[in-house]
Image (cartoon, rainbow, N blue to C red):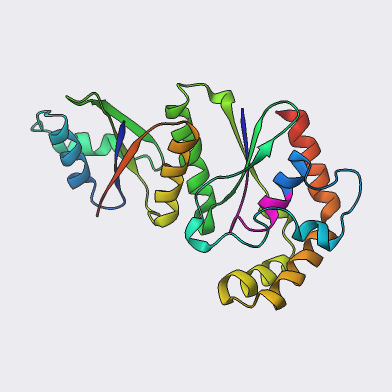
């Protein structure tokens, strides 16, 4: 089975959620900013790579976990992704889950992501994204726990 | 391999291209056929060509590089080869 966490740019929230899922980040406490910075791909995915699932690892149930940026047409592309997976997987609909992480985004993550990824001011934007993630980290934990239970 | 004809506006050209690919007759009531393929985001399977490629039609108003990446990325996830042909 494949579990895909999706967000806008595929650089912050989907990376954090998938990192919690596979164990790069703790699920029982709030991590430090440094721990978040050390996750693979955090605040590093270029805009041109949106739409390409980023493999983050395999969880304890042997499910493959990915992060995915879908840009501004997330609703339309999520439908297309499901339909395409349906064709590719030989009608095995249970093979894939796409989890929308965007509702967990705070304003500071959006602003920091814009400053870091779009404008290129990484030193200014990256700390903003981290503080925004940390503020809502409990919600990320809850989401991942729910996904693990439900899949 | 899967060959996907993607269109956002010009359904006539995309459907005609896909039908020609499959060497299918374009019937007299082509206008009615066009209306069959109008659900956005749905993959319409049309058949298999002479090289055993599966031919699909996809209507998406929001075609950009992300959709192209998405189709290519998902093909890789399932180890399938895909060719996307975008008809404007």
Question: Is B53 situated above or below A133?
Answer: above
Identified at 73% across, 66% down, the residue is A129
Residue B26 is a magenta residue:
no
- Counting from the top left corner in percent of width and height, residue B57 is at 29, 37
Question: Is A140 situated above or below A36?
Answer: above
Residue A16 lies left or right of residue B62; in this view the side is right
Identified at 46% across, 41% down, the residue is A80
Identified at 53% across, 57% down, the residue is A71
Residue A56 lies left or right of residue B24; in this view the side is right
- Counting from the top left corner in percent of width and height, residue B49 is at 20, 26
Which quadrant of the rendered structure holds the C terminus of chain A?
Answer: top right
The magenta region covers A5-16
Residue A14 is a magenta residue:
yes
- Counting from the top left corner in percent of width and height, residue A54 is at 58, 46
Identified at 54% across, 45% down, the residue is A53
Place residue A33 in its image quadrant: bottom right
């Amino acid at each position: 089975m494949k579990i895909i966490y999706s967000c806008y740019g595929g650089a912050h929230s989907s990376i954090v959620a998938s990192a919690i899922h596979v164990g790069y980040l703790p699920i029982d406490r709030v991590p430090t900013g440094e721990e978040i910075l050390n996750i693979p791909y955090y605040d590093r995915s270029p805009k041109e790579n949106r739409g390409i699932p980023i493999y983050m690892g395999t969880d304890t149930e042997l499910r493959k976990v990915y992060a995915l940026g879908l840009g501004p047409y997330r609703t339309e592309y999520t439908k297309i992704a499901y339909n395409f997976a349906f064709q590719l997987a030989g009608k095995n609909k249970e093979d894939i889950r796409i989890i929308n992480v965007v509702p967990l985004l705070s304003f500071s993550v959006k602003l920091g992501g814009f400053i870091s990824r779009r404008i290129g001011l990484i030193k200014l934007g990256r700390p903003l994204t981290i503080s925004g993630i940390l503020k809502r980290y409990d919600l990320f934990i809850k989401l991942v726990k729910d996904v693990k239970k439900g899949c | 391999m899967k060959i996907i004809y993607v269109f956002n506006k010009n359904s006539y050209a995309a459907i005609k291209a896909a039908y020609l690919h499959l060497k299918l007759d374009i019937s007299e009531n082509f206008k009615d056929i066009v209306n069959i393929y109008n659900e956005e985001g749905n993959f319409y399977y049309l058949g298999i060509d002479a090289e055993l490629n599966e031919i699909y039609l996809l209507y998406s108003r929001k075609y950009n590089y992300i959709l192209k990446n998405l189709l290519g990325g998902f093909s890789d996830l399932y180890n399938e080869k895909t060719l996307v042909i975008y008809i404007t």
